[in-house]
Image (cartoon, helix red, strand yellow):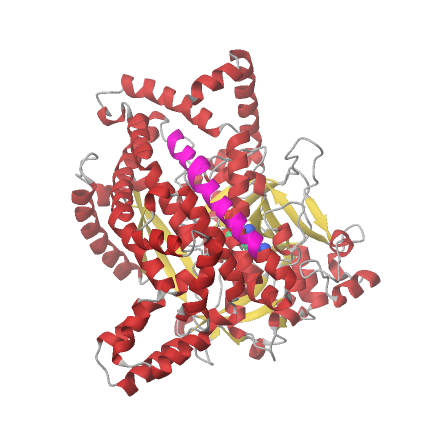
Amino acid sequence: MFSLSFQRIFPARVLLACCLLCLNFNARAKEGMHVPATLKSKEADMRAMGLEIPVEELFNEQGTGLNNAVVLFGKGCTGEIISSKGLVLTNHHCGYGTVQGLSSIDHDYFARGFWAMNREGELPCPGLTVTFVRGMENITARVLNGIDDTLNDIARNAIISKRIQSLEKAYAYTSGLDASIRPLYTGNQYYVFLTQTYKDIRLVAFPPNGIGVFGGDAENWMWPRHTGDFSMFRVYAGAGNKPADYAKDNKPYDAKEFFTINAGGYKEGDFTMVYGFPAVTDEYVTSSQVQQVQYISDPIRIAVRTQKLGIWNASMQQSRDVFLKYTSKRAGIANGWKKWQGEVKGLQVNNVTSKKLQYEQRFQQWAVAHDSAYPYAVGMPALIEAQTISIDSILKTDEYVREAVYGIELISQATATERLMQCFRTRMSAAALQDTLTKLVKNMGGFYKNYDAPTDEKVFAGLMQTYFAACPGWLPSYYRIEYQQHGSDFAQWAHAVYNTSLFTTQERLQKFAANATVSDSLRLLSDPAWQLYHSISVMRSNHITPALTHYSERMRYLNRLYMKAQMAQRNGADLYPDANFTLRLSYGKVKGIDPDGAAPYSYQTTLNEVVALDDSTSYEFKVPQKLKDLYAKKDYGHWAVNKTVPVAFITDNHTSGGNSGSPVLNAKGQLIGTNFDRVWEGTMSDLNFDPRLCRNISLDVRYTLFIIDKFGGAGWLLKEMKIVR
Ligand code: ARG
Ligand code: GLU
């Protein structure tokens, strides 16, 4: 159907012009997130685009490459080492959770920032880790040797996981490092990664939110951008420079490889690289899988979150208390909400499904011609399409269950019933029961501190109606009966639930806990929030989860074979593996953007624009007084360019979630910035990279240095960095 309408709209001549355009674009921007060990095959291309150093400086088998200066920061971000004494630069939003744990009313680092004035002043960060990748090796032959490609996944995995276990042990033993073996190309290749995880990490510098979150949600995923999204930590090591638990006497990690900072700037067209840990991409899926994202998952998530954000925003505007409670939660759900809107738009304007369909037709021709070597390839996209179509309605329901039903805070909070019930099952005395329950409820303080039941009641009424309308065939009896018993009126039903549920306030739950007797478990089990959660979850685990599990197992098998055939068809050329949180390098150029063809945006923003946006009545756009003072005095130290300071810039490197905090390098491999976001119009790059619309957003390292130096007054840190121009 799509291919037909595509041809009707685009006659052959236009198509040809489009193809030429695409080729032209490809010459300018480079799709791909490359495994560092494979960079040699890219070297000529990188050189042609501007690279000035041998790729061996980025990664080499002797283990002395710049990969040693790129770290997995915590569990989901990237960071870079910028001094021989283990200084790590990453994003503000990557350090945020850690800093929340270190903050209190007396030490409000979000309001005032944090600047260590010497080593002793650096703050230990319990739980935070930094992981180095010391080496990697393609060991596909050893993992897959003798296994037939078409062997079913259960049998295949049984063999593979045994091999992986013993290989990991052997690699760890011989290297003295941690070894983890990971699949690439959907299980068609395996690499061993040799890593070291440091556990004594200390906070060094953290600008206040007025800089680090400036522009907030309004500017999130947007260009032009003005967020000073950085923070700084230091890695500490034990004896022999090795990882060790926190100890006061640990020494700063002695880094042999770290990034030289280039404060000389860049201009449009300059070569750039991003080195980091992108999390997930799906570049090789079929048209039907893209459609699933574009027409089912993304739209459902966007619609439900639009509804929920509408209710939250209204409450937040009415009450400062609700605002403070919900601002961080709102940022969390708005992040995906905004990204998916960009993704859907990008998939639409790019006709990605149509392009994929065309590609699949060419694939099919190839498959027929290579039938003897790849018999499973013939008809593969159609086979995958049949699978996706068969799961569409289940998938749709699951999206609604997760977003609309579990999206109601009271409903997800009621899952605590399971934990509370454990106490009743262990047959303790009434006193012990009350004591244990009370402690459990006390631990829920984090949730209730940021919870407003009246707001959530409105969310319940709204989202339950949405679920009702969208999934009429998936209403458990409990749902139907309750709805009818409350006058078939969602607001009435919501009111009754919030009036009676134990989970509506911590006090109510606390009172229950303090007076509970063994027979009170029934009161818990009959709680309306729990009942509703339970009835939906039972339905889900009986009828949805098994189908989804079966589907994803089947798809893993088909996608692996489809990937294998695509690799053969394209001779492996230009096929980079999908992101999976392993270390990657992407290359591209500094480049402005013109998303709607109206007027191009420059590739850079400046401090002048930050100050022009200042709005003391707005939480997101309030510039700290001290920054305004520096601006008024033009007190920019070494960091002035054209009488201002550059703030952020865009390049067309291929990045994804997880690349937050990644070093952005120039042609010499020197640090010019820190990646922190993408432009929302181009977020479909997780499925399809479009050089016209895909841009990653980075913080200019000169803004970072200016803020540390002039705003934070922590100039002592600059002395240990190697800064060139
Ligand atoms: N969009 C960026 C990312 O995906 C930054 C998110 C944090 N900032 C925010 N305003 N919510 O992680
Ligand atoms: N902010 C994202 C992160 O935390 C990076 C943005 C993106 O998805 O490219 O990794």
Instruction: Point out residue 77 in the picture as x, y percentages from the top left corner.
Output: 48, 56
In the rendered view of the protein, which quadrant contains the N terminus?
top left
> Magenta region, mostly helix, strand or loop?
helix
Which residue is at the far right?
A: 633
In this rendering, the answer to whether 286 lies above or below 304 is above
Residue 38 among magenta residues: no
Residue 291 among magenta residues: yes
Instruction: Point out residue 196 in the picture as x, y percentages from the top left corner.
Output: 38, 62
Q: What residue is at 53 percent from the left and 24 percent from the top?
A: 23
Residue situated in front as seen by the camera: 19 or 715: 19
Q: Is residue 655 visible?
A: no
Q: Which residues are magenta?
A: 287-311
Instruction: Point out residue 124 in the picture as x, y percentages from the top left corner.
Output: 50, 75
Q: Is residue 63 visible?
A: yes
The quarter of the picture where residue 499 lies is bottom left
Q: What residue is at 37 percent from the left and 56 percent from the top?
A: 482
Q: Is residue 124 left or right of residue 580?
A: right
In this rendering, the answer to whether 709 lies above or below 337 is below
In this rendering, the answer to whether 587 lies above or below 675 is above
Q: What residue is at 25 percent from the left and 77 percent from the top?
A: 519
Residue situated in front as seen by the camera: 155 or 411: 411
The quarter of the picture where residue 424 lies is bottom left
The quarter of the picture where residue 317 lies is bottom right
Residue situated in front as seen by the camera: 496 or 254: 496
Q: Is residue 533 left or right of residue 234?
A: left
Q: Is residue 580 left or right of residue 351?
A: left
